[in-house]
Image: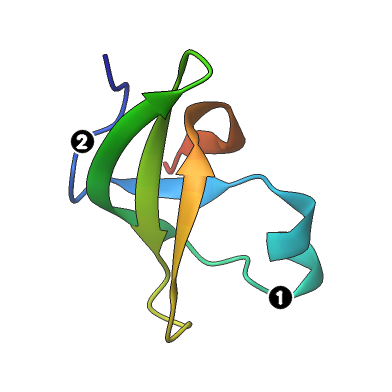
Amino acid sequence: MHRFKVGQSVRYNQSTARRSGSTASFKIIKLLPSEGGLSQYRIKSPSEAHERIAMENELNQDF
């Protein structure tokens, strides 16, 4: 079961996102099938042209 919903704003915790300057909020674009027992998401930042795939444990709710 996915913790986040499509359209929800989240923060991406992966170190590569911080190194590349992607500190803005990301939006959940699509719910993906689980891998290794963890839900996956397709996420997008308005400041980037590409989308990312993130595991649920790499995301936090954006307040």
Residue 16, located in which quarter of the rendered image?
Answer: bottom right
Residue 29, located in which quarter of the rendered image?
Answer: bottom left
Secondary structure under tag 2 reads loop
Q: In the drawing, does residue 3 fall left or right of residue 12?
A: left
> Percent from the top left, x then y, of residue 55?
51, 35
Residue sitting at 48 percent across and 13 percent down?
37
Check disc 2 and report the residue beneath it.
5
Secondary structure under tag 1 reads loop
Check disc 1 and report the residue beneath it.
21
Residue sitting at 66 percent across and 44 percent down?
13
> In the displayed structure, would residue 5 be above or below residue 23?
above
Q: Nearer the viewer, residue 52 or 22?
A: 52
Labels 1 and 2: the sequence-earlier one: 2
**Residue furthest left in the image:** 6
Q: Which mark is residue 57?
A: none
Q: How many marks?
A: 2
> In the displayed structure, would residue 24 be above or below residue 46?
above
> In the displayed structure, would residue 23 be above or below residue 35?
below
Question: Quadrant location of the C terminus?
Answer: top left
Q: Nearer the viewer, residue 38 or 8?
A: 38
Residue sitting at 30 percent across and 31 percent down?
33
> Percent from the top left, x then y, of residue 59?
52, 37
